[in-house]
Image: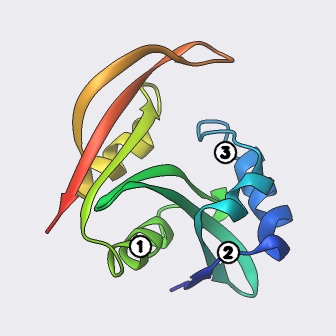
C-alpha cells in the first residue's frame, strides 16, 4: 500500500512524468500544483500517483487532477489518495472528466460521484465533452 503525503516542489518532476504518461488526464502545468492542496502516493521511494484539489468555498472543493503511473494502476493507489483527502474533508466535491475516459468515470462512480451535467467542447486537443460530476460527504 502506498504512503500518502503532502506533495512539494521536489515531487514535481515525477508528477510531470506521470501526467505525461496519462494523456487522458487533465494536462495542467505541474508547477501550478504546489499552489493547491496536493497529495502524492509513494511506493518504493517513488511518487506513483497524485491528487490535486482546490477549495472553492466553505465545504466545497474541486478535484483538479488525479493520475496514477501506468505501472501502479488498479492497485488501490487512486483509492488511497482519495481516502486520504476524505479523511480531512466533509462537504461537496466537483470534477470534470473527459467523456471518453471510461476508466476514470468508472472509478469516480465507484467512489460515489454522480454525473450532474455536461460541457460540450470543454477539453481541447482534441475537442471533447466534459462530464461534470459531484460527490457529497457528510
74 left or right of 47 in image: left
Report the front residue among 55 and 62.
55
Give the residue at x 76% y 79%.
46
Local secondary structure at mark 1: helix
Residue 31 position (above or below residue 46): above
Q: Which residue is mark 3?
A: 22
Badge nearest the viewer, 2 or 3: 2
Res. 3 image quadrant = bottom right
| Residue 78 screen position, x and y as percent | 47, 65
Q: Are circles 2 and 3 on residues that touch, CB within 8 Å?
A: no
118 left or right of 53 in image: left
Q: Earlier in the sequence, mark 1 or mark 3?
A: 3
Local secondary structure at mark 2: loop
129 left or right of 67 in image: left
Q: Which residue is mark 2?
A: 7
Residue 98 position (above or below residue 52): above
Q: Earlier in the sequence, mark 2 or mark 3?
A: 2
Badge nearest the viewer, 1 or 3: 1
Q: Which residue is mark 1?
A: 85
Q: Earlier in the sequence, mark 2 or mark 1?
A: 2
How far apart are the two marked residues, 1 and 3, measured between alpha carbons?
21 Å
Give the residue at x 44% y 35%.
97
Report the front residue among 89 and 11.
89
Residue 15 position (above or below residue 48): above
Res. 13 image quadrant = bottom right
Amino acid at each position: 500500500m502506498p504512503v500518502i503525503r503532502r506533495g512539494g516542489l521536489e515531487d514535481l518532476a515525477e508528477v510531470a512524468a506521470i501526467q505525461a504518461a496519462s494523456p487522458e488526464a487533465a494536462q495542467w502545468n505541474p508547477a501550478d500544483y504546489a499552489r493547491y492542496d496536493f497529495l502524492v502516493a509513494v511506493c518504493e521511494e517513488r511518487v506513483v500517483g497524485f491528487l490535486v484539489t482546490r477549495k472553492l468555498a466553505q465545504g466545497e472543493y474541486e478535484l483538479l487532477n488525479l493520475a496514477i503511473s501506468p505501472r501502479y494502476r488498479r492497485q488501490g493507489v487512486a483509492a488511497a489518495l482519495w481516502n486520504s483527502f476524505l479523511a480531512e474533508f466533509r462537504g461537496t466535491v466537483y470534477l470534470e472528466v473527459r467523456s471518453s475516459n471510461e476508466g476514470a468515470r468508472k472509478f469516480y462512480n465507484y467512489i460515489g460521484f454522480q454525473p450532474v451535467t455536461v460541457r460540450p467542447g470543454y477539453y481541447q486537443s482534441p475537442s471533447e465533452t466534459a462530464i461534470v460530476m459531484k460527490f457529497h460527504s457528510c
